[in-house]
Image (cartoon, helix red, strand yellow):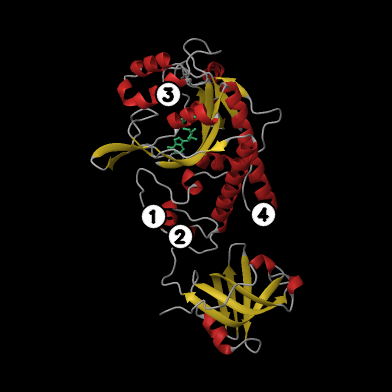
């Protein structure tokens, strides 16, 4: 059945403006049916919009019979407009309801949904992801994604305030930047190409012209790992700066995370009942632990780790590490080719760091190699073909400055800032090894 036309009808208030103070005023509200209950002569409907819910109460005698009957027959998720009068009502959660005199049904829901709009939890995440369009209407997710939006805005404003220039770099590239394993291959006209794993080399080059740059954009990782913390397509907040080292980069990452946390905390403060678990920043700043000390602590706690090993979540949990902290001075061996070896951790270490939240890696960063010969040697040691990076290496003929930076995974940051357990719920339409749709 064709739906009613919008025509010249326009919303006059959002749900938040349907309050006791507006008693007796006219209102046109629009949104989606979240619930309907009918008891013969009276029908109740909840209409959900951007801000919240409006109670619509259609009672025989106080509204036209046709309107009441139409409301009683509606399915949840139908999109509607209700015109009527605001009436103060202590029964209603917002303190007011709308008594309708007209209803328009723009698009009637065609089937019974796999879960209710008001469901706080739905057991199977795949059930939700298959119907992501309506899943995203559920309040718990609305809060996570609105907080995400607030965080992105705060991070951008913070970085602009520090004098960074926002840049965009190619996502279709000819050679790997973060090691060859996790690459997606694509066709580029008649050639093979890849989706960018990170903007790493471009952001480094851009420090030659803009000094302080950042980019917020997708990164692509062909992750075979099926975990609650890996996506195939993630959003990265990438920051890079000339004439600084990794200690400055840690300071910078700490300020970015502070700005992000502040935004999440303000969101949660302004939205009582959001359920977001926003963590505190550590008093006295984010602690910086040397990799060697963390290995020792994990070993003392019974984890079988040696200097040189990666630090798996289980080892970090054993070491009792919680909240935000940095692990710095990682072994150079497994680090990407552009990371500067040496530093305070010794000749086998590197000027690098990870920013952690409990056992979750939120960010990594480093001082970069800024000399061509050293960079080429690192590439050869890693079995890379130097010829593949001719353009990038060419930059080093024209005064590459000392530089450092970091990349923060936005979804992981949001997991930390909201208490979201599965990374898929920090991505609107998550991509993983098993999921390319919706
Ligand atoms: P790295 O590979 O550690 O470093 O990535 C940086 C951050 O991006 C996030 N991330 C991911 N999030 C979800 N799913 C994934 N598959 C995934 N892979 C990475 C993590 C991680 O800490 N170029 C460097 C950064 C730099 O040195 O500036 C880089 O890409 O939060």
Q: Are there few (<14), some (14-19), or many (20+) residues within 10 Å of tag 4?
A: few
Residue 293 percent coordinates (x, y)? 56, 17
Work out whether residue 93 can be spotted.
Answer: no
Work out how far the residue at label 2 is from the one at label 1, CA to CA, in angstroms: 9 Å
Q: Is residue 109 above or below residue 334?
A: below
Residue 43 percent coordinates (x, y)? 59, 80
- Residue displayed at 48% across by 58% down: 135
Work out how far the residue at label 2 is from the one at label 4, CA to CA, in angstroms: 23 Å
Nearest to viewer (mark 1 / mark 3): 3
Residue to which mark 1 is pinned: 438
Q: Earlier in the sequence, mark 2 or mark 3?
A: 2
Residue with the most extreme front position = 398
Q: Earlier in the sequence, mark 2 or mark 4?
A: 2
Work out how far the residue at label 4 is from the one at label 3, CA to CA, in angstroms: 49 Å
Residue to which mark 4 is pinned: 271
Residue to which mark 2 is pinned: 133
Secondary structure under tag 2 reads helix
Callout 3: CB less than 8 Å from ligand 1: no
Q: Is residue 32 above or below residue 174?
A: below
Residue to which mark 3 is pinned: 395
- Residue displayed at 67% across by 45% down: 265
Q: Earlier in the sequence, mark 2 or mark 1?
A: 2
Q: Are there few (<14), some (14-19), or many (20+) residues within 10 Å of tag 1?
A: few
Secondary structure under tag 4 reads loop
Q: State left or right for residue 46 relative to residue 192.
A: right
Residue with the most extreme left position = 190
Secondary structure under tag 3 reads helix
């Amino acid at each position: 059945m064709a739906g009613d036309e919008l025509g010249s009808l326009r919303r006059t208030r959002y749900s938040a403006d349907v309050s006791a103070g507006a008693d007796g005023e006219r209102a046109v509200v629009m949104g989606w049916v979240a619930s309907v209950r009918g008891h013969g002569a009276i029908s109740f409907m909840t209409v959900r919009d951007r801000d919240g819910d409006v109670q619509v109460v259609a009672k025989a005698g106080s509204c036209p019979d046709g309107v009441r009957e139409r409301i009683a027959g509606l399915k949840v998720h139908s999109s509607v407009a209700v015109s009527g009068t605001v009436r103060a009502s202590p029964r209603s959660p917002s303190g007011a309801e709308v008594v309708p005199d007209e209803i328009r049904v723009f698009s009637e829901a065609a089937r019974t949904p796999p879960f209710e709009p008001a469901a706080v939890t739905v057991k199977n995440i795949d059930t939700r992801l298959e119907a992501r369009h309506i899943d995203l209407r559920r309040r718990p997710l609305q809060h996570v994604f609105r907080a995400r939006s607030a965080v992105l805005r705060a991070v951008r404003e913070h970085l602009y305030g520090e004098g960074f220039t926002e840049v965009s770099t190619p996502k279709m590239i000819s050679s790997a930047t973060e090691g060859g394993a996790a690459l997606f291959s694509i066709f580029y006209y008649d050639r093979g190409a890849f989706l960018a794993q990170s903007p790493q080399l471009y952001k480094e080059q851009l420090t030659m012209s803009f000094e302080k740059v950042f980019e917020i954009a997708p990164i692509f990782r062909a992750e075979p790992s099926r975990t609650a913390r890996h996506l195939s397509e993630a959003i990265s907040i990438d920051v890079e700066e000339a004439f600084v080292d990794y200690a400055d980069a840690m300071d910078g990452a700490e300020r970015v995370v502070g700005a992000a946390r502040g935004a999440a905390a303000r969101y949660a403060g302004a939205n009582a009942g959001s359920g977001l678990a926003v963590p505190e920043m550590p008093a006295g700043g984010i602690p910086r632990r040397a990799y060697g000390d963390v290995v020792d602590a994990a070993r003392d706690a019974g984890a079988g780790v040696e200097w040189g090993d990666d630090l798996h979540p289980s080892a970090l949990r054993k070491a009792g590490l919680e909240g935000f902290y940095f692990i710095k001075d990682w072994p150079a061996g497994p680090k990407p080719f552009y990371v500067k070896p040496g530093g305070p951790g010794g000749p086998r270490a590197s000027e690098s760091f990870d920013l952690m939240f409990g056992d979750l890696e939120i960010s990594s960063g480093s001082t970069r190699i800024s000399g061509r010969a050293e960079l080429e040697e690192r590439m050869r040691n890693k079995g890379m073909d130097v010829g593949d990076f001719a353009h990038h290496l060419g930059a080093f003929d024209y005064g590459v400055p000392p530089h450092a930076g970091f990349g923060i995974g936005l979804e992981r940051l949001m997991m930390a800032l909201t208490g979201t357990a599965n990374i898929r719920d920090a991505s609107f339409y998550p991509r993983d090894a098993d999921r390319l749709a919706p």
